[in-house]
Amino acid sequence: MSKGLSLWFATSSILLLAAAAIAMSYNGWIAVLLGVIAIGNIGWGFVIKAKKNRLNGPEPE
């Protein structure tokens, strides 16, 4: 996975989890929804990484 795409998934996951933490003060259901979306976003990043590694082989570090 490219560094830009990795940065996108890391940043978007942090923002979603921060929004979930803030939403806990207002509405628990929105916080749960944002938490589930954040977990899905993290999982989606792993799926994309696995697909790219399967097609191209692992990237050198």
Image: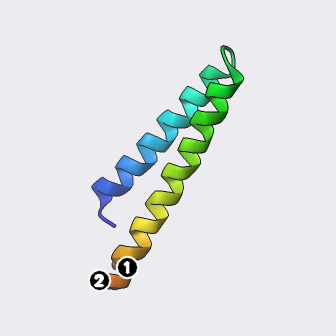
Residue 61 visible from this viewpoint: no
Q: Is residue 45 above or below residue 12?
A: below
Residue 45 visible from this viewpoint: yes
Colouring convention used in this rendered image of the protein:
rainbow
Q: Is residue 14 above or below residue 46?
A: above
Q: Are marks 1 and 2 in contact (CB under 8 Å)?
A: yes
User: Is label 1 in a helix, a strand or a loop?
Assistant: helix
x, y percentage for residue 39?
58, 49
Answer left or right for 61 relative to 24: left
Dividing the image into 4 quarters, which one contains the C terminus? Answer: bottom left
Dividing the image into 4 quarters, which one contains the N terminus? Answer: bottom left
Residue type of the residue flagged with mark 2: Asn
Q: Residues within 10 Å of mark 1 (few under 14, many from 20)?
A: few
Answer left or right for 36 relative to 8: right
Disc ID at residue 53: 1
Disc ID at residue 11: none
Give the distance between the C-alpha atoms of the residues marked 1 and 2, in whole angstroms.
5 Å
Residue type of the residue flagged with mark 1: Asn
Q: Residue at x 67, y 18 (%)?
A: 27
x, y percentage for residue 23?
62, 21
x, y percentage for residue 4?
28, 54
Give the residue at mark 2: 56
Classify residue 26 by image quadrant. top right
x, y percentage for residue 58?
37, 82
Q: Residue at x 34, y 75 (%)?
A: 52
Q: Residues within 10 Å of mark 2 (few under 14, many from 20)?
A: few
Picture mark count: 2
User: Is label 2 in a helix, a strand or a loop?
Assistant: helix
Q: Residue at x 39, y 66 (%)?
A: 48
Answer left or right for 37 relative to 45: right
Viewer-side residue, 18 vs 3:
18
Q: Residue at x 54, y 43 (%)?
A: 37
